Image: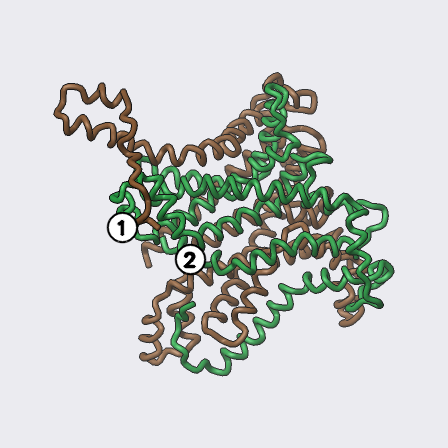
């Protein structure tokens, strides 16, 4: 295919006038070279331009706007002209972190629930993903099929899957209560899953169900990069399969895990889709994740200023955790 | 796919652990799929009483009714347009950016990579509010309706998949020998000629993986869809909840609709998952 390409010389079609002027008075050789070099130097930036422009428009500019908004009293009266909203200084932040007043107290509660939820959900997702990936490292009959099955939760659209879970968690008509109460008689009555304290466990279950296939996928990819010779050498030295897993597989997965756990943490902590579809607009207190909390305090009360302040606090928290995590894990990697 | 370990006979303990763990995980993974399929074939009274494993009488009625209870066809078309548009744009933009990251050693390369990837960690809620305001104000000022339009949603979704797509494609491009595009340039192609005549054809599996990823991201997003759409542009993500807000929840129809909207993505994903794993592996090698 490449052999039939007609020789189109993009690289010497349009020498830029600026380049020619700059090279004036030099030898012919450098006069020819400079524009080409300039063009070559600017090409990567031109290639990046669309990506950069889009990221600027959708992520970075709104973020700056968000920070500005957090210092304003931005209520529904100013939605169509937000620049007219009066400045409020740090008031939005003061209200958000005043843990003795209702707003701050609720925010703190939501934050703590989110932390608990994240630790549990990430831990379990990682555990399931690791177990499945390691157990499926060797070929066995049905491995390909099983891999496809495990990826189904990841492939299903969130809302379709989570709506199904909410049907399963229904008190009177759901499958979960049918199994644990009607068939196994584990509980006296039919527990509620989508309201009250149990909603926390419902949320963790659904979240783990959605996340662990991603961990599985990444770890599976990571396992393929472990050189076969390592295992052969270990087997020659008499190491059994469990020892091989502990001494070779798990340590070799450390670089993958470093990124994977961080990504899982960020996704889980920021998760909005799962609770939103599972509980609807009003999440129960026990499952009031921070994204839902901010969404509600912004779009239900139309107080965008205070919602932005909470978002900024959330971002700062995530930044600090991420930096500390990367520092800690990188240090450990250097030690090892 | 190469197996890392030699096919030495695994001990009994390992085989049994494998059987048990994988069985439990299979049941966990497939439980909702089972409920979805079975419930979508039930008559209404079956889903209004206690749960039963199998329908009292098979019926396909829910599959006919879902199109009338809510305007599902319109949501479907909207989702297709939005997800398809976002995928095409995202992949096109990512190809250029990944080529720059993979083939050029320019000033700010590391900075670009870190910045792009770090946008992944921003909570969606953080830029939802400002983006909402920017779209509304931009619409008021210029008459370009981004808020409530499919275009605005496409623009938003394509940036969601962009960072990961660039990262994955750059990894894939790295695995294509540079000699190939240098040879093309010697033959007289410019850098862009080399990209489209040599690198892109060689990276088709990676590009397919990125397409799948971008499509799934856009097809499944809920938060922005719930704020940025109106009645005519509503996507499945929001529309599907229409069944639940009726006074009576037609769970059999909800399950049928869920299945119908899942089949295209799940089928596409399972067909192409091999490429996705390959793309991830290439990205992870870096």
Report x, y in % for residue A6. 31, 42
> How packed is label 1: few (under 14 Cα within 10 Å), some, or many (20 or more)?
few
Please tell me whether mark 1 or mark 2 is closer to you in this view. Answer: 1
The letter of the brown chain is A
User: B176 left or right of A207?
Assistant: left
Mark pair 1, 2: CA separation: 22 Å
Q: Earlier in the sequence, mark 1 or mark 2?
A: 1
The chain that hosts pointer 2 is B
Report x, y in % for residue B17. 54, 76
Query: Element under label 2?
Result: helix
* Depth order, front residue of A152/B144: B144
Read off the residue under disc 2.
B281
Read off the residue under disc 1.
B179
Query: Element under label 1?
Result: helix
Residue A100 location, quadrant? top right
The letter of the green chain is B
Report x, y in % for residue B84. 58, 44
């Amino acid at each position: 295919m490449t052999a039939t390409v007609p020789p189109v010389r993009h690289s010497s079609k349009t020498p830029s006038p600026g380049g020619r002027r700059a090279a004036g008075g030099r030898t012919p050789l450098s006069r020819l070279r400079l524009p080409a070099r300039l063009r070559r130097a600017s090409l990567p930036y031109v290639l990046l331009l669309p990506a950069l422009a889009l990221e600027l428009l959708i992520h970075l500019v709104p973020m700056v706007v968000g920070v500005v908004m957090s210092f304003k009293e931005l209520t529904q009266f100013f939605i169509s002209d937000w620049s007219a909203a009066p400045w409020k200084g740090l008031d939005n932040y003061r209200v958000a972190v005043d843990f003795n007043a209702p707003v701050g107290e609720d925010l703190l509660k939501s934050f703590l629930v989110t932390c608990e939820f994240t630790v549990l959900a990430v831990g379990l997702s990682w555990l399931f993903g690791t177990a499945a990936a390691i157990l499926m490292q060797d070929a066995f009959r049905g491995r390909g099929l099983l891999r496809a099955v495990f990826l189904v939760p990841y492939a299903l659209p969130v809302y379709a899957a989570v709506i199904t879970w909410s049907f399963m968690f229904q008190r009177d008509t759901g499958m979960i209560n049918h199994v644990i109460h009607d068939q196994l008689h584990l509980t006296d009555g039919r527990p509620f899953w989508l309201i009250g304290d149990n909603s926390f466990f419902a949320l963790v279950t659904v979240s783990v169900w959605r996340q662990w296939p991603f961990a599985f996928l990444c770890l599976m990819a990571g396992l393929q990069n472990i050189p076969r010779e390592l295992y052969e050498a270990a087997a020659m030295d008499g190491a059994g399969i469990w020892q091989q897993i502990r001494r070779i597989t798990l340590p070799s997965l450390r670089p993958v895990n470093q990124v994977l756990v961080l990504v899982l943490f960020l996704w889980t902590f920021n998760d909005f889709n799962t609770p939103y579809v599972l509980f609807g607009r009003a999440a129960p207190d026990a499952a009031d994740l921070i994204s839902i909390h901010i969404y509600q305090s912004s779009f239900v009360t139309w107080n965008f200023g205070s919602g932005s302040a909470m978002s900024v606090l959330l971002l700062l928290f995530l930044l600090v955790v991420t930096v500390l995590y990367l520092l800690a894990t990188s240090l450990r990697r250097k030690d090892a | 796919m190469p197996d890392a370990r030699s096919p030495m006979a695994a001990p009994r303990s390992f085989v049994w652990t494998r059987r048990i763990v994988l069985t439990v995980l299979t049941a966990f993974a497939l439980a909702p799929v089972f409920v979805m399929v079975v419930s979508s074939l039930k008559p209404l009274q079956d889903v209004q009483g206690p749960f039963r494993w199998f329908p009292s009488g098979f019926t396909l009625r829910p599959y006919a009714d879902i199109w009338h209870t809510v305007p599902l066809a319109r949501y479907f078309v909207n989702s297709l347009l939005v997800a398809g548009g976002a995928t095409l744009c995202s992949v096109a933009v990512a190809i250029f950016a990944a080529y720059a990251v993979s083939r050029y050693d320019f000033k700010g390369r590391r900075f670009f990579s870190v910045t792009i990837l770090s946008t992944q960690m921003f909570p969606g809620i953080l830029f939802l509010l400002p983006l909402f305001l920017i779209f509304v104000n931009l619409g008021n000022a210029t008459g370009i309706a981004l808020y409530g339009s499919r275009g605005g949603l496409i623009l938003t979704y394509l940036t969601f998949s962009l960072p990961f797509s660039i990262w994955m494609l750059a990894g894939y491009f790295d695995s294509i020998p540079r000699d190939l595009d240098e040879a093309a340039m010697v033959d007289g192609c410019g850098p862009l000629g080399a990209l489209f005549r040599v690198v892109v054809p060689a990276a088709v599996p990676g590009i397919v993986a990125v397409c799948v990823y971008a499509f799934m991201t856009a097809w499944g997003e809920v938060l922005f869809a719930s704020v940025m759409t109106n009645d005519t542009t509503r996507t499945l993500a929001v529309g599907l909840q229409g069944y639940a807000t009726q006074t009576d929840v037609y769970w059999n129809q909800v399950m049928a609709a869920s299945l119908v909207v899942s089949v295209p993505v799940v089928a596409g994903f399972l067909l192409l998952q091999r490429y996705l794993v390959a793309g991830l592996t290439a990205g992870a090698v870096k």
